C-alpha cells in the first residue's frame, strides 16, 4: 500500500482535535501525523457525514495485518480509559482509522516505527448516522 485512502472528518471533530493538538509539543510524532491527516481531510458538517465514515465516538470493527479482528470505540484522549474497549485518536490505530470508510486500509507508523496495517471492516455505530450530532 503506497497511497492513503481519502478521508472525511466532521467540522465538529476537527475543531475538537485541533484544540487537543495545540496542547501537544510541536515536534511530537503523533501530532505531526494526525495534523497531516487533518490537513488532507475533506471536512463536512456533522449532518452531511456519509454513514460509512469513521468519526469520533464511532464503534469500529477493524482488522490488523495479521488478520486479527478488533472492536473499539474511537475516542478523545480523555475518554481512552474504558477497559480496553476504547482507543484514543492519539494512538496509532485510532489516528489511522479517523475519517476512513468501511473497506479502506492504511499503513500507519506504529509506536516502534514498524508500519501497522489497519483495515476498517465494519462501522457498528456512528454518532452522526444515529442523529447524535452534539456528542
Image (spheres, rainbow, N blue to C red):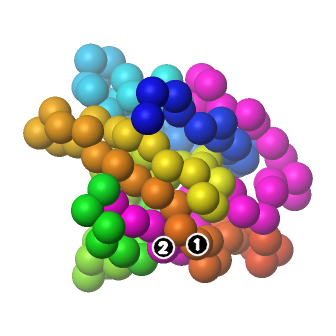
Labelled pair 1, 2 in contact (Cβ < 8 Å): yes
Q: Which mark is residue 61?
A: 2
Is any atom of residue 83 visible in this view? yes
User: Dot 2 lies on which element?
Assistant: strand
42 falls in the magenta region = yes
User: Dot 1 lies on which element?
Assistant: strand
Q: Which mark is residue 92?
A: none
Q: Position of residue 117 (x, y in %)?
A: 35, 49
Q: Position of residue 82 (x, y in %)?
A: 32, 78
Indicate whether 36 appears above or below 62: above
Q: Magenta segment, which residues?
A: 38-64
Kindly identify which residue carries mark 1: 122
Seen from the viewer's position, the closer of residues 67 and 107 is: 67
Seen from the viewer's position, the closer of residues 74 and 93 is: 93
Q: Residue at x 81, y 42 (%)?
A: 44
Q: Quadrant of the C terminus?
A: bottom right
34 falls in the magenta region = no
Looking at the image, residue 82 sits to the left or right of residue 14; the answer is left
Amino acid at each position: 500500500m503506497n497511497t492513503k485512502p481519502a478521508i472525511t472528518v466532521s467540522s465538529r471533530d476537527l475543531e475538537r482535535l485541533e484544540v487537543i493538538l495545540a496542547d501537544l509539543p510541536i515536534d511530537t510524532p503523533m501530532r505531526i501525523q494526525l495534523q497531516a491527516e487533518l490537513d488532507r481531510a475533506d471536512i463536512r458538517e456533522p449532518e452531511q457525514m456519509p454513514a460509512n465514515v469513521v468519526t469520533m465516538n464511532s464503534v469500529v470493527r477493524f482488522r490488523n495485518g495479521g488478520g486479527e479482528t478488533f472492536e473499539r470505540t474511537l475516542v478523545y484522549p480523555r475518554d481512552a480509559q474504558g477497559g480496553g474497549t476504547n482507543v484514543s485518536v492519539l494512538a496509532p490505530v485510532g489516528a489511522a482509522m479517523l475519517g476512513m470508510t468501511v473497506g479502506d486500509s492504511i499503513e500507519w507508523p506504529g509506536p516502534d516505527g514498524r508500519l501497522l496495517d489497519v483495515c476498517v471492516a465494519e462501522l457498528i455505530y456512528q454518532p452522526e448516522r444515529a442523529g447524535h450530532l452534539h456528542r
